[in-house]
């Protein structure tokens, strides 16, 4: 009998490991109707953690593409793979055509951030959380205030004046940390657009709190002390206190202006009812977060890539110098000037394609759907991998190369450039972000020189790709000729 004990123990261990490895498949995989196509290939990984270990390992390495690349090399180029991420069964949509279907078919795929993330970090009634008619109504209400040509034309003189002051301050200081300073500036700018007046907030503290909160958006949503998600929840609570104070002060004062908060306070729905207080606060917080963080990263990467590609730098400088020379002293840039910055536009698009500030977006499946020969079950989540679309050599030739002219030479289809999403969920602040970035780079490249203090920076990819040292530079004002 004693001789059998080791064999029995080994057998039990094998059975236990098999049960653990297959638990997610047994628990979450639905029973499909007879004749239905199978689920996409893939693995649901370990209980609770699923494939998060592989995801984090890839994004903490120098090759984040290795996460999706592992599915492709193991299961082929089908464009759909099953996984278990952020504590939920998930389909990875990785090809351009599949991502287009997921992002544009709103009858089947609705916004699908993890429920806990929506409740504890994003807010239940923001644009990135509401669905269906509620989303359409809210979009019609808020998008004109953020991204319409009239709104942007109104905002541009203020943005440009602030940019001029900012760059002079940078040059006076000499050495700055580019990303940190860009964050502060874009936060102050979006604060002015959204709130319109001095609210007494500590911009440095608020920027840091938003950064901490954003780390939790793509972390495993387990609220244990010391985890990225737990820190994010605490940061969000601190931010909420500031924004509730701002809200109540404005509401009780009865003061109104041309800012977004005033517009939301006066807005009514189709039944004539005002927006709920918590929705207004959540909206202002979400706009301020999205409106400064992504733009700060975009401007930083523009500065980096222009320095690393002298030919692109010289060509863009020539375009911007030509526009600057046509301006009288003190004359502001106009929307017509923005439209004439054709090379600037391509440089920005190529930067967003190469860097992939948002690697993927979440959707949720409303009903069983058949796609590419597979079944995607109702209630499962889908991640549209924008990064994979942008870095796919079958979509973009030599995708790791920085080539602004690819947007002329390749003539890519619209759904192969998805930096701001697609369909009616496209980022409402995309135009404002590009305009603001263009104004900053216009004045930086025509009037200043900047040199990186650490050209051999290390890259980190979460929550957004950036140099680990945030790109310290020395800035000097160019002598007038």
Image: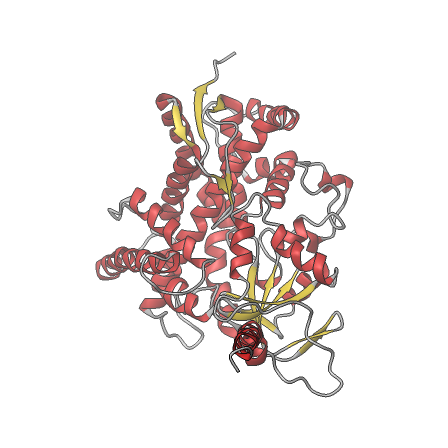
Q: Is residue 142 left or right of residue 372?
A: left
Picture layout, residue 179 above or below residue 444: below
x 65%, y 34%: residue: 343
x 69%, y 36%: residue: 403
Q: x and y percent of residue 288 in the render?
A: 39, 52
Q: In this rendered view, identify the residue nearer to me: 222 or 441.
A: 222
Q: Is residue 182 visible?
A: yes
Describe the colour scheme in one phrase: secondary structure
Q: x and y percent of residue 280 in the render?
A: 36, 64
Q: Is residue 202 left or right of residue 181?
A: left
Q: In this rendered view, identify the residue nearer to me: 212 or 324.
A: 212
x 63%, y 78%: residue: 377
Query: In terms of image quadrants, where is residue 213?
Result: bottom left
Q: In this rendered view, identify the residue nearer to me: 355 or 88.
A: 88
Q: x and y percent of residue 25 in the render?
A: 59, 76
Query: In terms of image quadrants, where is residue 122?
Result: bottom left
Furthest residue toward top: 481
Q: Is residue 148 visible?
A: no
Furthest residue toward front: 2
x 43%, y 37%: residue: 179
Q: How many marks?
A: 0
Picture layout, residue 251 above or below residue 18: above
Picture layout, residue 48 above or below residue 212: below
């Amino acid at each position: 009998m004693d001789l059998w004990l080791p064999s029995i123990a080994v057998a039990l261990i094998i059975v236990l490991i098999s049960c653990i490895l297959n638990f997610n498949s047994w628990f979450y995989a639905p029973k499909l109707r007879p004749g239905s196509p199978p689920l996409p290939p893939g693995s649901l990984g370990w209980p609770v953690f699923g494939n998060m270990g592989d995801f984090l390992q890839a994004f903490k390495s120098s090759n984040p593409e290795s996460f999706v690349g592992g599915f492709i090399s193991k299961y082929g180029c089908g464009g759909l793979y099953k996984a278990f991420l952020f504590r939920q069964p998930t389909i990875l949509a990785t090809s351009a055509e599949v991502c287009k279907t997921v992002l544009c078919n709103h009858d089947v795929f609705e916004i699908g951030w993890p429920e806990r993330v929506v409740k504890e970090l994003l807010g239940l009634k923001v644009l990135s959380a509401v669905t269906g008619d509620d989303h359409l109504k809210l979009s019609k209400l808020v998008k004109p205030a953020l991204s319409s040509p009239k709104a942007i034309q109104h905002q541009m003189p203020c943005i440009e004046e602030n940019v001029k002051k900012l760059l002079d301050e940078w040059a006076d200081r000499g050495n700055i940390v580019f990303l940190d300073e860009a964050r502060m500036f874009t936060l102050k700018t979006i604060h002015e657009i959204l709130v319109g007046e001095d609210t007494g907030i500590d911009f440095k503290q608020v920027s840091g709190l938003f950064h901490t909160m954003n780390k939790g958006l793509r972390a495993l949503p387990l609220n244990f002390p010391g985890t990225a998600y737990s820190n994010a929840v605490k940061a969000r609570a601190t931010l909420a206190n500031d924004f509730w104070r701002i809200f109540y002060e404005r509401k009780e004062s009865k003061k109104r202006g041309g800012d977004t908060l005033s517009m939301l306070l006066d807005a009514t729905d189709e039944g004539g009812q005002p927006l709920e207080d918590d929705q207004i606060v959540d909206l202002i917080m979400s706009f301020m977060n999205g409106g400064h963080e992504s733009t700060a990263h975009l401007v930083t990467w523009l500065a980096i890539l222009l320095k690393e590609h002298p030919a692109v730098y010289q060509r863009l400088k020539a375009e911007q110098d030509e526009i600057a020379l046509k301006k009288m002293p003190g004359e502001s840039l106009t929307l017509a000037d923005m439209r004439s910055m054709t090379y600037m536009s391509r440089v920005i698009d190529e930067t967003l394609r190469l860097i992939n500030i948002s690697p993927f977006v979440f959707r949720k499946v409303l009903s069983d759907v058949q796609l590419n020969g597979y079944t995607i079950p109702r209630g499962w989540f889908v991640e549209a991998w924008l990064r994979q679309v942008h870095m796919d050599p079958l979509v973009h030739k030599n995708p790791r190369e920085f080539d602004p002219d690819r947007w002329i030479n390749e003539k890519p289809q619209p759904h192969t450039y998805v930096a701001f999403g697609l369909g009616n969920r496209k980022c409402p602040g995309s135009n404002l972000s590009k305009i603001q970035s263009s104004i900053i780079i216009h004045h930086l490249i025509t009037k200043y020189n900047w040199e990186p203090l650490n050209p051999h920076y290390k890259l980190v990819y979460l929550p957004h790709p950036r140099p680990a040292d945030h790109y310290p530079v020395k800035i000097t004002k160019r002598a007038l000729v």
